[in-house]
Amino acid sequence: MTASEKFGIVIAGHGSRDPDAVREFEALVELVRERAPEDAVSHGYLEFASPTIAEAVADNLAAGARQVAVVPGVLLAARHAKNDMPAEMQAVARDYPEIDFHFGAPMSLDPKLLQLAQERIVAAEATSPQTVRRADTCLVVVGRGTTDPDANGEVAKLARMLEEGMGFGGAFVCYSGTAQPLVADGLRSAARLGYARIIVLPFFLFDGVLVKRIYAAADDLREREPGLEVLKAGYFGVHPLVADVMIARAREAVAGRAAMNCSLCKYRVQIVGFEQQVGEPQRAHHLAVRGLQARTEGDTAIATSPVYKPYEPHPIEAESFRIIAAGRDWSAFPPDQLTVLQRLVHTSGDFDAVDDIYFSPGAVDSGIRALLRCKRVLTDVTMVQTGLKRALLEELGIDTWCGVHDRETHLMAEQYGITRSAAGIRRGWQKFGNDVVVAIGDAPTAIFEAVRLIRDHGWRPQLVIALPVGFVGTRESKDALRRCLQVPRITNSGTRGGSPWAASVVNGLMIDGLNQLAGYDAGPDAG
């Protein structure tokens, strides 16, 4: 490139608690620097390690760059490359409006990386004293595992290309987390296929906690199956081919040729099972551990838990709850129920609304713990979703899901002759299992379906909130839930209710949960 075409490269890494991973990432950055001497090269991390991406950009600009390519130092386009890193770049672009920023594609299945995978596999085969035909070998490719099926599918594609290109008898794909099957389960399944040899290839850039676990699982399999040869191939690591792919991605970004796989991106088109994430805004989820390495005391890192502050209502909201607290005698109600009950009064405008609210024993505590641990709310209609306080959801990292408008829900409703709300609850049971809080504010049929799944199929959601309004099946559905002793539940005994009521209960639980994390006891009249 000519002098006028020089630009800066910021390699954006994920970051790790494992110092081996950080050292290897920084060694790769140095290799990029050596192989692109005409460019300013810096690096930053999303979380745990330092410097941050914003600090890396500042270093790059200090070196004289006026065009900056931010390149994801990750293999595949999942949440980090599609949301977190673009969000970081947007933030720094606002800080430096005079600078041209370009976002590069992740490395993906570049031919150079296929060559490197081939090198790692051949090196693993060379460690064995035995000669085994590839046709008698099963290649097990272990990916990171994400919530993005597009990225998970790329791992399967890599396995298939290596299987056919190198002549393996078979290939098996598993993941170190989030996606199924997990490593130990995948290795057990591969061992049952009857091959003489298994080669385990971690589809990872660097060493770290997950790679160590993968190798430990391979060692466990070797011990359990002494007649099966298990070889461990190296991860990609610090290698000129990796550095060259990163440099190429930076060049492509500046030239406007950053090729993202948008045709199967769940944020841009409806992908089966992920329809509700189309158009999801780009929000970073790593803020609590950004730059953690810099926040150390001696050799001991400061706790990674974020610092929480008590819930601060708007002044008008605070005045409303002062009036509600003084508006009736609350002494008959358990203190742990007051936040929820007073929020129901606030929502309904009726002090008597709380008189027929039913809490099963321990329901409030179960709900708070579930929100903080499982971090997912399943709703019957989108009105419940929209009634949830967005700031609280984001601060606590809680996801919401409602399938009532999804194509699969429509198909299920038609095929089984049930309402879409009931079908959405059934899909939520299938997708999330027990780790969910259910909030029903509109459809009695959703309550009946939840009760059926609980009684007949062993579903055990952490809490069921059911407060629909209406006259057809409403009383009966609430009574059925109240008699359903297998799960914690919050409901009422009448026809009153609605989506705002169900959302208010969840909001009250989130407020109490946040205050607990902040170590704050607001007292019995907190609202």
Image (tube, grey):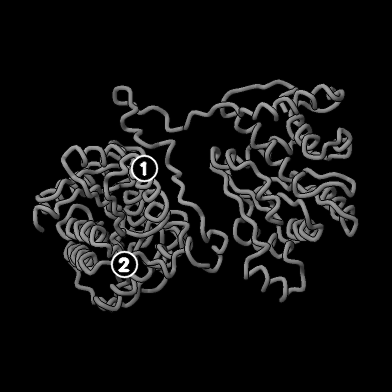
- Left or right placement of residue 244 versus residue 296 in this view: left
Q: Amino acid at mark 1?
A: Arg
> From the viewer's perspective, is residue 127 above or below residue 132?
above
Nearer the observer: mark 2 or 1; the answer is 1
**Which of the image's four quarters has the N terminus?**
bottom left
First in residue order: circle 2 vs circle 1: 1
| Residue where numbered disc 2 is placed | 198
Circle 1 crowding by C-alpha within 10 Å: few under 14, some 14–19, many from 20: few
Query: Can residue 437 be seen here?
Result: yes
**Which residue matches tag 1?**
94
In the image shown, does 39 or 490 lie closer to the viewer? Answer: 39
Query: Label 2 sits on what residue type?
Result: Ile
| Mark 2 residue element | strand
Residue at 66% over, 31% down: 512
Question: Mark 2 Cα within 10 Å, few/some/many (few <14, many 20+)?
Answer: many
Q: Are marks 2 and 1 in contact (CB under 8 Å)?
A: no
356 lies left or right of 413: right
409 up-or-down from 214: above or below: below
Name the residue at 74% across, 36% down.
362
Across and down, in percent, residue 109 comes to 29, 66
Q: Position of residue 379 (x, y in %)?
A: 68, 53
Q: What residue is at 27 percent from the left and 65 percent from the top?
A: 257
**Residue 381 vs residue 443: left or right?**
left
User: How far across and down, in percent of the image, does residue 297 sit?
Assistant: 33, 22
SS for dot 1: helix
Query: Which quadrant of the figure has residue 425?
Result: bottom right
